[in-house]
Image (spheres, rainbow, N blue to C red):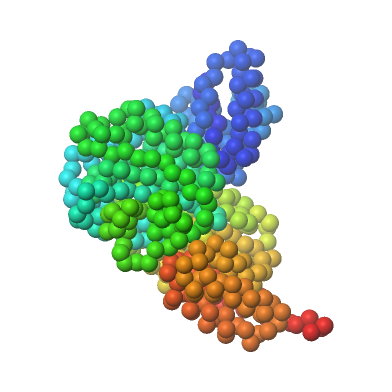
Amino acid sequence: MKIYVPADSAALALGANDIADAITQQARARGLTVELVRNGTRGMIWLEPLVEVEVDGVRHGFGPATPDDADAILDGTSAKALGPVDKLDWMQRQTRLTFARCGVIDPLSLEDYQAHGGLAGLRRAIAMSSADIVDEVTKSGLRGRGGAGFPTGIKWNTVRQAQAAQKYIICNADEGDSGTFADRMIMEGDPFTLIEGMIIAGLGVDATRGYVYLRSEYPDAIAVMTRAVEIARAAGVLGADVLGSGRAFDLEIRKGAGAYVCGEETSLLNSLEGKRGVVRAKPPLPALEGFLGQPTVVNNVISLATVPVIFEKGAQFYADFGLGRSRGTVTLQIAGNVARGGLFETAFGMSLGAVVNDIAGGTASGRPVKAVQVGGPLGAYMPVSKFDTALGYEEFDAAGGLIGHAGLVVFDDSADMLCMARFAMEFCAVESCGKCTPCRIGAVRGVETIDRIAAGDSAAIPLLTDLCETMKDGSLCALGGFTPFPVMSALTHFPDDFARVKEAAE
C-alpha cells in the first residue's frame, strides 16, 4: 500500500506529521506493509492535510484528515473520501505546467523527478548554444512572475552579451507578499525543477555560479532546497561537469533575514553581498553590474521553475497558452476570506470574477465580496465592478491594477477600506529601506494624513492624492512607487469609507 501525506508547510501546520505517525502506527499494528511518501501539496489548502492512497495506480484523496482518521483511511471507509484526486474539479480545471509535479512526486527523489519528465529540458538545453537557449526563452514569451512582468528573454540576452570573467544566476526566493505561497510550494514540493531552471539559465548566459536567496521564515523550504542541492550535486546534475556535458554550474542556498524590501532585486543583491539591504539606484542595471559588480540574472522562483517546461515541451507549446502579451500560465494564490483557498494554475485570460466567485467559491463568511487585493500589499484593491478584468499584465494595468506575484486576497463587505489604505502606508513606513525621501518620509506622512481623514478632515483628501503622486513618481523602487496603488484604489472605489464625521467632542 502506497500512501502520500504532504510535508508542505501548510499541511504541517495543520497536523500532517501527526497523521503520518498515526498511519504508520496503525499499519504496523495490522501487520500491513505501507510505503509512506511525504509529497508536496496539490494546492487545495482547504482540504489539507490531504492524504492520498494509491489503489491500482489511481490516487484517492481523504481530507482534511486528522490522526483519528487513520483507521478508516487504511480500511477505505473514511467519510472524508474525495475520490480520485486528479478528477476533482479544482484539479481538472487547471492547466498545470510549472506545478505539474507538485504534490505528485517525492520532492527529494531525483528518480521520481526524472520519471515525471524532469531533466528532459536540461538535456535538450545542453545540446544547444547559449544564443539558442536564450532565443527559446524569448520565443516562449515568458515574463517575470515576481513583479513587473519583464520579458525573461530580454534580461537573459543582456547578460549573455555582457563581457565578464564571471556571471551569476540569482533566484529571488524572498517571497514576502501577503497572500503568496507559490514559491514556497514549488521549493517544498518540486525543488529539482528550480535547480534545473537555474542550470539552464546558467548555460544560456554563460554563468557558472548561482544563489537561491531564500527568506528565513521558510525553514521547511530551506531544508528541502538544501538537501535537493546536495542530491543534485552528488548525481552530477550540479558541479564542474553538468550531466557529463563538460559545462559547469553550481549553486548555494543563502538565507535572508526577512526584510520585505529585499524582494527588490538590487536590495537583495546588497544583502547577498553581506551589506545592508538598501535599494541601489539604476543604472547600472543588475544585468550588467549585479552581484559583486558582475553581470547577473535575477529571476523569481516561478520564472526559473517554468524554464524546464519550455525546454521539455518547446517554446511554441508554452506560448500557445495565454492572452495578448501574457503568455503561458499564471499561478494564482487565492487567500483571505474565501471558501476555497489555494494555488490554481491556469492560462492567462480568466476573469478576476471567475476566479473569486467560481474557483474560490466566494467568501468563507458568506457575506458579499467587497474587494480583492491582487499583487500583494502593493497591489490595488479591485472592486466588484472590475471583476470582468482579464488576468493579463496589460489588461490589469489598464484597469489600474497589477498582477505582481499573482496573490489574491479577498475581503467581504465588512472590510473598512480606509483602514486598509492606512495599513498600506504603515506597511511602507515600517518596511522602507530609508534610501529615498519619497518612500521614507512619504509613507509616514501618509499615515498621518489618513488619520486626519479618519478624524473627519475631508480637506486632507487632496493632500493624500498629491502625496501618492509624489511617492509614485519619485521613489527609487516599487515599495514607495507602488504603495499608492492600494491607497488610491481604496479612495477611488470606496469613497464612502473615507467620508468620516468628526467626533462631537471636537
109 sits to left or right of 361: left
Q: How many marks?
A: 0
Residue lying furthest top: 31
Residue lying furthest front: 275
Q: Is residue 250 above or below residue 163?
A: above
Q: Quarter holding the C terminus?
A: bottom right
Q: Is residue 65 visible?
A: yes
Residue lying furthest right: 505
Asked whether 494 or 265 is in front, the reply is 265
Q: Is residue 320 visible?
A: no
Asked whether 320 or 132 is in front, the reply is 132
Name the residue at 45% across, 41% down. 187
Name the residue at 17% across, 45% down. 129
Name the residue at 38% across, 48% down. 171
Q: Whole-percent x and y of residue 37?
A: 50, 27
Q: Whole-percent x and y of residue 143?
A: 34, 57
89 sits to left or right of 167: right
Name the residue at 47% across, 24% down. 56
Asked whether 496 or 221 is in front, the reply is 221
Residue lying furthest bottom: 459
Q: Whole-percent x and y of residue 471?
A: 49, 75
Q: Is residue 383 above or below residue 44?
A: below
Q: Whole-percent x and y of residue 72?
A: 65, 26
Quarter location, residue 265: bottom left
